[in-house]
Image (cartoon, grey):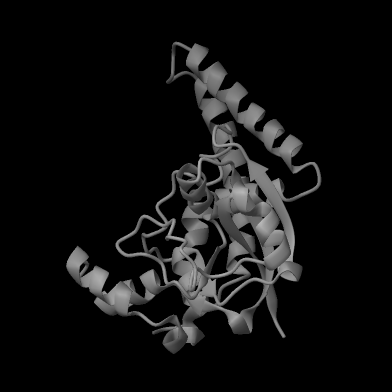
């Protein structure tokens, strides 16, 4: 049996319920989808992400006037399915008009494309499963809506866009999510944030942006970000093996 770690973002008001019952689908409940996409997410699936839990968690937090809640979960890969948005975009090919995508997304059945879950994770950062039991929850973090980390952690992302490899575009986010769930993760993120802030503050104070000092600072910032992206990309690429639909 093969397992991987993924994330799920929701509102903090559901913490006690999830710790007791696990992460369950909306089927048979009055809960509405938190995702503001072309169509509502499937009622009988739970959605997991390698890089976008903060984006989805913020949607839920705003809807329920709550803080964000990010879970790290352990899931058996045999229980994973591709996200229906990925299925629809692959079926549509070069024809990306909203009417067609809405139709294909609503009709997509993740069960029929089960073998492509890794493609979905690699190209969109998302997959789905039937449920997450309480014992599959490894850890969780609560983030205030006003946290200065949110944009850093992908709150302003656009997870509905297909790309060749999410690790190229979202490696930094994956790296920072990893930090968040480490021991003293909050302190590590704050130190990283302060490091970037000091560089930005010094850059603003320099009048000559084309000068040697500003170039050195920009290179230093770029080197830091590249190292983060490279580390995060390694994590993401270890989850995904590309196959053709």
Residue found at x 21% / y 64%: 98
Q: Nearer the viewer, residue 191 or 226?
A: 191
Up-down relation of residue 48 to residue 115 (above or below): above
Residue 213 visible, this angle: no
Residue found at x 57% / y 33%: 221
Query: Left or right: 88 with respect to 18?
Result: left
Residue 128: x and y in percent read: 52, 72
Residue 108 sits in quarter: bottom left
Number of callouts: 0
Residue 196: x and y in percent read: 60, 30
Looking at the image, the residue that sits furthest to the right is: 183
Query: Can you say which quadrant of the picture contains the C terminus?
Result: bottom left
Query: Left or right: 93 with respect to 185?
Result: left
Residue 95: x and y in percent read: 19, 71
Up-down relation of residue 153 to residue 160 (above or below): above
Q: Nearer the viewer, residue 128 or 239?
A: 128
Residue found at x 65% / y 28%: 195
Residue found at x 65% / y 27%: 194
Query: Left or right: 63 with respect to 213?
Result: left
Query: Can you say which quadrant of the picture contains the N terminus?
Result: bottom right
Q: Nearer the viewer, residue 49 or 121?
A: 49
Residue 12: x and y in percent read: 62, 47
Residue 31 visible, this angle: yes
Looking at the image, the residue that sits furthest to the bottom is: 112
């Amino acid at each position: 049996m093969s397992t991987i770690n993924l994330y799920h973002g929701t509102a903090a008001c559901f913490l006690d319920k999830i710790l007791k019952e696990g992460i369950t689908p909306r089927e048979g409940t009055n809960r509405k989808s938190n995702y503001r996409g072309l169509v509502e997410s499937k009622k009988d699936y739970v959605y997991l992400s390698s890089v976008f839990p903060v984006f989805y968690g913020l949607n839920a937090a705003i809807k329920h006037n709550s803080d964000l809640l990010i879970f790290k979960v352990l899931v058996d890969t045999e229980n994973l399915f591709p996200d229906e948005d990925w299925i629809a975009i692959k079926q549509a090919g070069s024809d990306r008009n909203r009417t067609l995508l809405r139709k294909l997304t609503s009709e997509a059945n993740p069960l029929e494309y089960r073998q492509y879950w890794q493609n979905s994770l690699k190209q969109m950062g998302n997959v789905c499963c039937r449920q997450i039991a309480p014992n599959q929850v490894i850890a969780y973090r609560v983030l205030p809506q006003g946290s200065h980390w949110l944009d850093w952690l992908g709150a302003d992302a656009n997870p509905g866009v297909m790309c060749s490899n999410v690790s190229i575009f979202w490696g930094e986010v994956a790296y920072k999510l990893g930090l968040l769930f480490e021991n003293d993760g909050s302190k590590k993120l704050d130190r990283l944030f302060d490091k970037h802030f000091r560089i930005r503050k010094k850059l603003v104070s320099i009048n000559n942006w084309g000068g040697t000092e500003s170039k050195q600072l920009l290179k230093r910032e770029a080197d830091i970000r590249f190292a983060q992206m490279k580390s995060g990309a390694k994590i993401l690429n270890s989850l995904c093996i590309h196959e053709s639909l």
